[in-house]
Each structure stands twice: as structure tokens, then as C-alpha cells.
Amino acid sequence: MSKKKAVVSLGHNALGHTTLEQRDAVKVTANALANLVEAGYQLTITHSNGPQVSMIHKAMTELRRLYIDYTPAPMCVCNAMSQGYVGYDIQNALKAELLSRGISQTVSTILTQVTVDPYDEAFYEPTKLIGRYMSAEDAEIEIKKGNYVQEEPGKGFRRIIAAPTPIDIVEIEAIRTLADAGQIVIACGGGGIPVIEQKHALQGASAVIEKDIIAGKLAADLHADQLIILTSVPNVFENFGSENQAPIPSLTVKQAMDMAAKEAFGQGTMLPKIQAAISYLSANPDGSVLVTSLEAVSDALKGKAGTFITA
């Protein structure tokens, strides 16, 4: 019996916010992922990296402030660093968990680049906050460099960068080859490293890519049977955060689009997940999307939790 191919998107709660938190969090995450493997899934895994890439960016910026000979690391390099160390923790924790269950399966991390359009409107209207809080003087220096900053009252200024729409996953064939060989693959971490094609070269872009959006594209490109988005809540909710919030057990693409048009989903929380589901199902109408929490995924596979979205 062939395995069900699934792309799993891991949220912040699957990784924690610091290196020590991540070390502990991935053990819990590995348990949930191993349950999926035992349930007959062939996994390709992607993950968030917001706290991790921000931590690296802060560290490299402070290093430059203390040692003038060092240069600040551009966002593309910070993203690559975060992919490496997050992938390292996930693959080792998952490999150990699988072996403890008598399952010998290779787990690999692929450093993944994603092309973006240099003229994407997101570059002119950046929205993603990154890095440390700065003084007004430091913020002015960043502005003179051509960077964007945003003030958070009472806290200071922070850089904001673009979140452009992904075009192509550069290493998709390598990911597909490993997945088809039965390996578990960790790829497109943090949305992938955004790059711009310049003749025959790839130039890193000062941007980040929404990890849920790239999860939808990854699932579509791999013709996955299912996209599983693991977040902090067990279901998509109607009237989320209100006294009459109610779990939504299932949605069609049309219903999801209608609710999105009515701004029923949080802009930076649930909306990207719904957009990823719509994108994936538009390309693969025979597939399905499961949105649930890390803790509830086993119950969701039994139909006791989660929100299922179909074409």
C-alpha cells in the first residue's frame, strides 16, 4: 500500500523562541511527526523561523556594533543560517524518535531558495517586523541606508522588510527526488531564502517569504495528497476571540474565499493559512488541507478535531 504524501507546515509553537526552547520543543514536535509516519504518511516538512531569524539578525547586527571589522549579515544570509540550525534540530529529534519506534528512515534538510520578483509591490510596502528595537538615531541611520523602519510607541523603532510572493522553489527537483525515494525532507524553512534571478546568478533579496504561502506552493509542486498546517489552535474558528467563537469542522474553497472576503480571518495569523489552502487546492483539487494544532493532530486524523478544507 502506497503512503499518503503530505506536506507539513510547522508554526512557531513547534520550535520555541530560543535555542534552548527549540531543543525541548522539537522533541514534542518529533513525537507528533512520528505519529504521522506511523499513520502511513510520507512527509515533507517546512517550518516557521520568525523568532530564529530575528535572533540571528540581532546577533549579527550587535556583532558589527562591537567589532567594526565585521559586516552585518544580510537577511538572505540570516535566513540561510536559520534554515540550517532549525533543520538540524528537527531532523535529529525526528530521527531519534523514529528509531525509538523501530523505524529506520532518513531525514534530510535541504537549504532552499525561492525566487521572487524584484518589482513585487511588497518591496515598496514592507510589512514584516524584524530585529532589535532601535533608538531614533539608529533608526535614522537605517533609513539613510535605504531600509524601512517602523516605530512601536514606548518601545522604539524596528526594521520592516518585504514579504513578496514566491515564484519558484529553486531546489524543487532535489526535494522531489528525495521524497520519491521515501526520505523525509525538511525544506523551504522560514518560507525559503528569497532570491532574485540576475542573468545566470541568484542574488539574495532583503525580504522574507510567508511560510504558510510557500507550504501551499510546495504541496502543489509535489502533487501532495494533503497539506497539514500545524498551528497554535485545534481548529479554524468562526468569530475567533469572541464569546461566541465556534470551531469550523470543514470548509470548501468557495466558503473559505467568501469568509476571507469578509475579513473573517486574522491578517497575520489564520489568513495566510487559508490563502495557502486555496492556492494548493486550486492546483490540486483532489487533495485536502488539514488545519489543526500540534497537540490535536492525532485526534484530527480520526476526525475528532481540526478543520478540513477541500476543493
Image (cartoon, grey):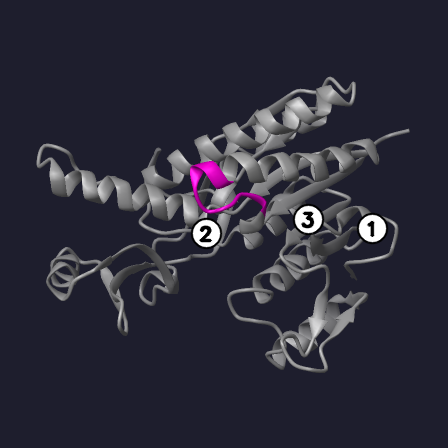
| Image vertical order of residue 75 relative to residue 147, above or below | above
Instruction: Tell which tag, 2 or 1, sits nearer the viewer.
Output: 1
| SS type, badge 3 | loop
Q: Secondary structure at mark 2?
A: loop
- The residue where tag 2 is placed is 209
Amino acid residing under circle 3: Leu
Quadrant showing the C terminus: bottom right
Q: Looking at the image, tell me whether mark 3 or mark 1 is earlier in sequence order.
A: 3
Q: CA distance from mark 2 to mark 1?
A: 30 Å
Q: Which residue is mark 1?
A: 299
Picture residue at 71% right of the left edge, 71% below the top: 237
Residue at (10% x, 62% y) in the render: 137
Disc 1 crowd rating (10 Å Cα; few below 14, some 14-19, many 20+) is: some
Element type at mark 1? helix
How far across and how far down the image is residue 292, in percent?
71, 56
Within-10-Å neighbours for mark 3: few <14, some 14–19, many 20+: many
Amino acid type of the residue tagged 1 in the rendering: Asp
Instruction: Choose the circle earlier in sequence order: 2 or 1.
Output: 2
Q: Is residue 20 magenta?
A: yes
Q: Dividing the picture into quarters, in which one does residue 106 lie? A: top right
User: Which quarter of the figure has residue 222?
Assistant: top right
Residue 193 versus residue 87 in the image, above or below: below
Local crowd size for mark 2, using a 10 Å CA cut-off: few (<14), some (14–19), many (≥20): many
Q: Hey, what amino acid is under mark 2?
A: Ile
* Rendered position, 278 above or below 288: below
Q: Quadrant of the N terminus?
A: top right
Q: Name the residue: 67% across, 54% down.
A: 280
Closer to the camera, 153 or 237? 153
Residue 113: x percent and y percent? 45, 38
Range shown magenta: 14-21
Q: Nearer the viewer, residue 285 or 142?
A: 142
